[in-house]
Image: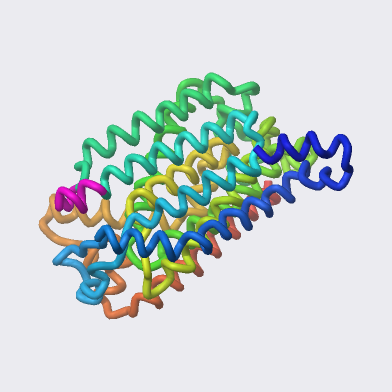
Amino acid sequence: MLTWLFEQLARDYSAFNVFRYLTFRGICGVLTALSICFVFGPAAIRRLSKYKVRQTVRTDGPPTHFEKVGTPTMGGSLILIALVVATLLWGDLGNRFIWAILFTTVTFGAIGWLDDYRKLVDRNPRGMGALNKFLSQSVAGLVAALFLYFTAVSPAETELLVPLFKQVAIPLGWGFVVLAWLTVVATSNAVNLTDGLDGLAIMPSVMVAGALGVFAYASGNLFYAEYLGIPYIKGAGEVLVFCAALVGAGLGFLWFNTYPAQVFMGDIGALSLGAAIGLVAVIVRQEIVLIIMGGVFVVETVSVILQVASFKLVGRRIFKMAPLHHHFEMKGWPEPRVIVRFWIISLILVLVGLATLKVR
C-alpha cells in the first residue's frame, strides 16, 4: 500500500527512493509489527481478561501448569493483526506470493479461532475435533498449493531442491500440490503441538521465519540466486517483507508471552504461524531445509506420534508425557530451562539450514 504511494512521490522527491529498497521495507515491516504489538498488546490482554477468554489446563498435565489457569488466551489475534497490517503497508500488493501467504495465514487463523472458541465457549477440550480441523486445514492448504501451481511462471517453482547438491532438482508435476499441501498442514500442526510452554513456539517461529526471509531475498534476486546456486524465482524476494513482519509481530508478542506469560497465543496464533512458515518454505523451494531449521517442531511432533503408537500397540509409553517438552518437565526440569534450551537448539538448527545456502 505505502509502496505504491512512495513510488509516486519518488518521481518528484528523490528522498523517497529509499522506500523502493526491499531490505528497507523489510526493516519497516519489523518495526511496524513490533510497534503494533507494543502499543495494543496491553489493551488486548485486558480485553481478553474482561471477556474471560482464559486458558484451561489439562488435569493430567504437569502440576506446575495449574498456576496457568486463568491466563488470557487467543493472543495470537494480536500477532495476526500486526502481521497482516505490516505486510499490507510495506509489501507490494501486486505480488502474487504476498496474497497467497496472507490468504493462508488468515484462513488458518480463522480455523484456529473457531477451535479456540469451541474450547472456551462450548467447554469442549477437543475444540472443533481432530477430523474437522484437519479437513478445514486441508481445504485451505490445497487452495494455496493449487494457486501456486497454476500461477508458476518457471519450472523451478515446482521442482524439489535437495540441499548440498547444486544440480539436483526433481520435477514434481502434480506432486508439487501434494508436497505443498503436506508442508503447510504439517507445519501448522507441528507449531501448534510445540506451543505448550511460555514462549516455546514463538521464538523458534521467529528464527525460522527470519532465515526463510534470507532465502526469499536470495531466490528473488537473479545475481544472488546464480551465485549461490539456487533457482531464481521471480517475485519471491517480496516475501522478505512478510517474513520481516512475522519476526516483528513474534518478538512483540514474546514481550507479553515470555515466562511467566501474560497471554497465550492459542490455536489462532499457532496454526496461522505454522501455515505461514510452511507456505514460505514452499515458495522459496526449501521444504527439506525447513525440516532442518524447524527441527524442534519436527521432534515435538514425532514424540507425539511415537507416544500414541507405542501406547496403542504395546500398551506402554516411551516418554513420561508428550509432546517432548512435557517429558522434560516431568523429569523435574524448570520450565524456563526447557524453553531456553529448546531456543538454543532451534538457533543451531537455523544456522545449519542457512549454511546450506553456500554449501552446494
The magenta stretch is 117-126
> Which residue is rendered at x = 71% and y = 39% of the image?
3
Which quadrant: the N terminus? top right
User: Could you tell whether 199 is left or right of 73 in the image?
Assistant: right
**Which quarter of the picture shows residue 342?**
bottom left
User: Could you tell whether 199 is left or right of 6 in the image?
Assistant: left
Vertical comparison of 233 with 270: above or below = above
Q: Nearer the viewer, residue 325 or 241?
A: 241
Point out residue 159 in the picture as x, y percentages from the top left corner: 57, 29
45 falls in the magenta region: no
The colour scheme is rainbow
> Which residue is rendered at x = 81% and y = 38% of the image?
9
User: Could you tell whether 44 is left or right of 149 in the image?
Assistant: left
Point out residue 260 in the picture as x, y percentages from the top left corner: 37, 75
Say whether residue 269 is visible.
yes
Vertical comparison of 340 with 233: above or below = below
Q: Nearer the viewer, residue 81 or 129?
A: 81
Q: Nearer the viewer, residue 314 or 254?
A: 254
> Which residue is rendered at x = 21% and y = 53% of the image?
120
Point out residue 62 in the picture as x, y percentages from the top left corner: 22, 72
Vertical comparison of 135 with 130: above or below = above
